[in-house]
Amino acid sequence: MFDIRTETPFDIQAREALLDSCFGEARFAKTCERLREGRLPAQDLALVATRDGALVATVRLWSVAAGPGRPALLLGPLAVDPALQGLGVGAKLMRAALGRARDAGHGAVLLVGDAPYYGRFGFSADAVGGLWLPGPWERERFLGLELRPGALAGARGLVSPTGALEPKPDLGALFRAAAANDAGRLALAA
């Protein structure tokens, strides 16, 4: 039995380990990573699947523009523990993510992935024929899905990130904390 829920900060370490085991370091070189870099996932659209309390699958959706003035979501990455692939957890997670996106009023989802796998959820290359990505990509793997009829009709142009930026650490506070920690250690050593 798999449970699907919204990702929490406590899931980060397990999610990153799962992504590393599924995709390795090469995942950071992908064009879609440029659209996610320094951004937060779309609100309430970062999901995980757990089994007996352990994180076994993850998917996130990101806010992008599908050409000028056309909001959309970018899906990815979707990852499932290799030992559990083929049991339907990825499909269950996909349906949950797409359902939440539709319920939240989003009109379209884009992704770069395996057309036969994602085609069963309604994704097609035809939906994104007038769009391109900011880096190398394979046309047959660039797919789109309209959650709302017509959401991608006539879409043309560059896909670009629009999501909220990740908060940056306050470097001054970090330096002050490090200095205070060092001063405390020096006082204890004296």
Image: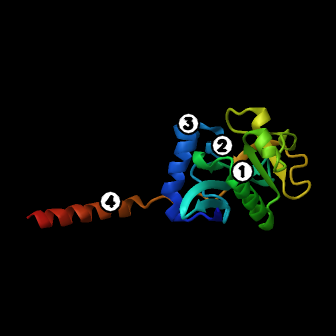
Closer-to-camera residue (142/52): 52
Q: Secondary structure at mark 3?
A: helix
- Asked whether disc 4 touches disc 3, contact meaning CB atoms under 8 Å apart, the reply is no
Name the residue beneath numbered marker 2. 32
Viewer-side label of 1, 3 = 3
Identify the residue shown where x is 52% and y is 38%: 25
Viewer-side label of 4, 1 = 1
Tell me how far mark 2 sits from mark 1, CA to CA: 8 Å
- Residue 173 is situated, as x and y percent measured from the top left of the image, at 37, 64
Closer-to-camera residue (118/133): 118
Tell me how far mark 4 sits from mark 2, CA to CA: 33 Å
Q: Residues within 10 Å of mark 3 (few under 14, many from 20)?
A: few
Name the residue beneath numbered marker 3. 26
The amino acid marked with disc number 1 is: Leu
- Sequence-wise first label, 2 or 1: 2
Name the residue beneath numbered marker 1. 74
Viewer-side label of 3, 2 = 3
Viewer-side label of 4, 2 = 2
Tell me how far mark 4 sits from mark 3, CA to CA: 32 Å
Q: Residues within 10 Å of mark 1 (few under 14, many from 20)?
A: many
- Asked whether disc 2 touches disc 1, contact meaning CB atoms under 8 Å apart, the reply is yes
- Sequence-wise first label, 3 or 2: 3
- Sequence-wise first label, 4 or 2: 2
- Residue 90 is situated, as x and y percent measured from the top left of the image, at 69, 52
Identify the residue shown where x is 56% and y is 52%: 38
Name the residue beneath numbered marker 4. 175
Q: Is residue 138 visible?
A: yes
Compared across the picture, whether 106 is left or right of 4 comes to right
Compared across the picture, whether 113 is left or right of 13 comes to right
- Asked whether disc 4 touches disc 2, contact meaning CB atoms under 8 Å apart, the reply is no
Res 141 quadrant in image: top right
